[in-house]
Structures are given as structure tokens and as C-alpha cells.
């Protein structure tokens, strides 16, 4: 999935996250994370973001996350929504797990 424009998903409310995804000139995923719980859960948050993007086939993107204590399921949903918007797609490619 190619990121064609910059897109946002989420809010800055407690227990949510604001995810911004856009195209990148560099290969790979450039991830910037701001979180209230970064010291304790930063690695886990990064893993969820990278796994979610990999499952969508995103190999090149700039990602900025402002986390306010979101659960993994919320973070996944926000990353998926932002990636779909940035790619100009309207439907998530579903597959059985």
C-alpha cells in the first residue's frame, strides 16, 4: 500500500491516540512516538504500529503518533484508518487470521 498524501486518525483525548501518516522519501517506516507511557510501553506501541502497517503492506511511510494511553486495539484501528486515508482507499483488505 502506497501512501499518497498525509492523513490523520484519532483524537488527543485520554485513552486515545492521534496518528499521522504520510509519504516518505526514505525507505522503511520512519516512526516518531510521543506518549505519556513511552518509558514503560514505547517498545510495545512501536511493535503494534509496525505490525499493523506490515499487515497492510505499507513499506514506506512517515508516521507520527501522539499517544494518550490507548489500548492496542485502539492503536491498531487508528493506524489502519490513517493508512487507508493516506493511500486513498476506502476499504480495509480483510483476511482471515
Image (cartoon, grey):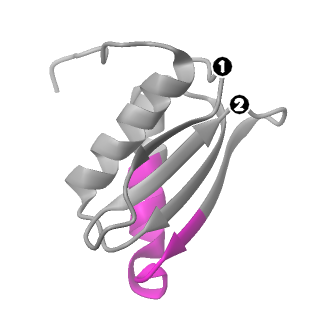
Give the residues drawn in magenta, as a range. 33-49
| The one of 68 and 39 positioned closer to us in this rendering | 68
The residue wearing badge 2 is 23
Horizontally, residue 66 falls left or right of residue 6, namely left
Within 10 angstroms of label 1, few (less than 14), some, or many (20 or more) residues? some
Hey, which quadrant is residue 4 in on the image? top right
Q: Residue furthest right?
A: 25
- For the point 25% across and 53% down, the residue is 74
- Identified at 21% across, 51% down, the residue is 73
19 above or below 54? below
Q: Residue at x 65, y 35 (%)?
A: 22
Query: Relative to residue 91, is residue 68 depicted above or below?
Result: below
Residue 97 image position (x, y, % from top left): 17, 27
User: Is residue 71 positioned above or below 58 on the image?
Assistant: below
Classify residue 95 by image quadrant: top left
Residue 44 lies within the magenta run? yes
Q: How far apart are marks 1 and 2 (CA)?
A: 6 Å
Identify the secondary structure beneath mark 1: loop
Residue placed under numbered mark 1 in the picture: 4
**Residue lying farthest to the bottom in this orientation:** 39
Q: At which x and y percent is residue 10? A: 37, 50
Crowding near pointer 2: few (<14 within 10 Å), some, many (20+)? some
Amino acid at each position: 500500500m502506497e501512501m499518497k498524501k498525509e492523513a490523520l486518525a484519532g483524537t488527543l483525548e485520554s485513552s486515545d491516540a492521534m496518528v499521522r501518516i504520510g509519504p516518505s522519501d526514505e525507505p522503511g517506516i520512519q516512526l516518531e512516538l510521543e506518549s505519556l507511557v513511552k518509558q514503560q510501553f514505547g517498545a510495545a506501541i512501536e511493535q503494534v504500529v509496525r505490525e499493523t502497517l506490515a499487515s497492510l503492506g505499507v513499506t514506506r511511510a512517515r508516521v507520527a503518533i501522539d499517544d494518550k494511553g490507548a489500548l492496542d486495539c485502539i492503536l491498531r484501528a487508528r493506524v489502519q484508518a490513517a493508512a487507508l486515508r493516506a493511500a486513498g482507499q476506502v476499504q480495509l483488505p480483510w483476511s482471515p487470521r
